[in-house]
Image (cartoon, rainbow, N blue to C red):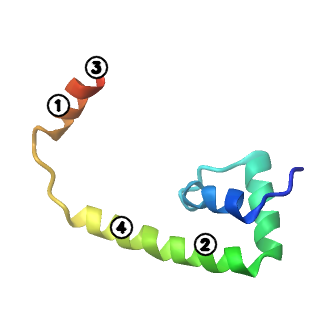
């Protein structure tokens, strides 16, 4: 298993929080977190930020035609 640097570990945080990591990437991140207090602190900050953003987004009202506008842009 490849050992992650702190920079690589941080790049996986939001996928980890969304439970979108599995297999070797998940194992590598968890191994890194077991040994790196600095990244554990960064992960906790990311966890709080993720909760804050998700709470704010759940309160937002999106325009009714937003999906149609996004689809038009994506099909260009």
Q: Position of residue 28 (x, y in %)?
A: 80, 56
Q: Position of residue 66 (x, y in %)?
A: 16, 40
Q: Which mark is residue 48?
A: none
Mark 4 and mark 3: span between their CA atoms?
28 Å
Between disc 4 and disc 3, whose residue precedes? 4
Mark 1 and mark 2: span between their CA atoms?
35 Å
Between disc 1 and disc 3, whose residue precedes? 1
User: Which residue is tagged 4?
Assistant: 53
Vertically, is 71 above or below 19? above
Q: Secondary structure at mark 1?
A: helix
The answer to whether 14 appears left or right of 52 in the picture is right
Q: Secondary structure at mark 3?
A: loop
Mark 3 and mark 2: span between their CA atoms?
36 Å
Q: Secondary structure at mark 2?
A: helix
Q: Position of residue 74 (x, y in %)?
A: 29, 26
Q: Which mark is residue 75?
A: 3
Mark 4 and mark 2: span between their CA atoms?
15 Å
Q: Are marks 4 and 3 in contact (CB under 8 Å)?
A: no
Q: Are marks 4 and 1 in contact (CB under 8 Å)?
A: no
The answer to whether 66 appears left or right of 43 in the picture is left
Q: Residues within 10 Å of mark 4 (few under 14, many from 20)?
A: few
User: Which residue is tagged 2?
Assistant: 43
Mark 1 and mark 3: span between their CA atoms?
11 Å
Q: Residue at x 28, y 62 (%)?
A: 57
Q: Position of residue 24 (x, y in %)?
A: 80, 48
């Amino acid at each position: 298993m490849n050992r992650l640097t702190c920079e690589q570990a941080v790049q996986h945080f939001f996928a980890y929080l969304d439970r979108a990591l599995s297999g070797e990437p998940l194992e590598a991140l968890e191994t890194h977190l077991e040994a790196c207090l600095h990244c554990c602190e960064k992960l906790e900050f990311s966890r709080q930020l993720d909760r804050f953003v998700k709470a704010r987004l759940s309160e937002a009202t999106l325009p009714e035609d937003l999906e149609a506008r996004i689809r038009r842009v994506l099909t260009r």
